[in-house]
Amino acid sequence: MKDAFNKNYDDLLKAHVENYQKYFNRVSLQLDGSNAANLPTDERLKQYNTGSSDVGLEALYFQFGRYLLISSSRPDGIPANLQGIWNNEVCPPWSSNYTTNIMWR
C-alpha cells in the first residue's frame, strides 16, 4: 500500500490493466441476439429484470466475473474464496474454506 500511495492514479491504472489483461485476454465470449449494447447498463438491467432478453448483458456479467476473479486471485497470493458480497451469511457453509470434497444435495 505504501508504494501505491506514492503513485498517481493514471500510473496505477495503467499497471493494473497491463497486469490483468494477460489473463483476461485469453477468453472471449460473443453471444448474438441483442441490440441493447448501446443502452446504459442500468437500463439494460431494468429491461432484463422485466423479462427482456439481453444475451450481451449476460456476456458482460461473465466477463465482469472473470475480471473480479483475476483481480482477486493472483499468482503467489491466495485465491478468492466463497466469501464476498454474494454471501449473505455470518457463518457461511464450510466457513468459506477452500474445499474440494463438497457434495451438493
Image: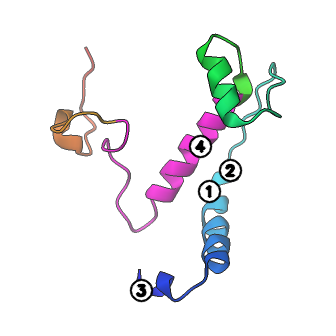
Cα–Cα gap, marks 2 and 1: 6 Å
> Are the residues at dot 3 and dot 4 in contact (C-beta closer than 8 Å)?
no
Which amino acid type corresponds to the residue marked 2 in the rendered image? Arg
Relative side of 84 to 20, left or right: left
Residue beneath label 1, please?
Answer: 23
Q: Secondary structure at mark 3?
A: helix
Q: Quadrant of the C terminus?
A: top left
Residue visible at 37% across and 54% down in the picture: 79
Q: Are marks 4 and 2 in contact (CB under 8 Å)?
A: no
The residue wearing badge 4 is 64
Residue at 54% across / 42% down in the picture?
65
Q: Judging from the image, what secondary structure is the residue with disc 2 in?
A: loop
C-alpha distance separating marks 3 and 1:
26 Å
Q: Amino acid at mark 3?
A: Lys
Distance between mark 4 and mark 2 Cα atoms? 14 Å
- Verify CB contact (< 8 Å) between mark 2 and mark 1: yes
Residue located beneath label 2 in the image: 26
Mark in the foreground, 3 or 1: 3
- For the residue pair 104 and 34, the one nearer the viewer reads as 34
Q: Quadrant of residue 36?
A: top right
Residue range highlighted in magenta: 57-86
Counting residues from the N terminus, which is met first, the one under dot 3 or under dot 1?
Answer: 3
Residue tagged 3: 2
Q: Is residue 67 magenta?
A: yes
Left or right: where 42 falls relative to 31: left
Q: Quarter of the image holding residue 42?
A: top right
Of residue 33 and residue 90, the one placed in the foreground of this image is 90
Whole-number angstrom distance, CA of label 1 to CA of label 4: 13 Å
> x, y (%) of residue 102?
24, 29
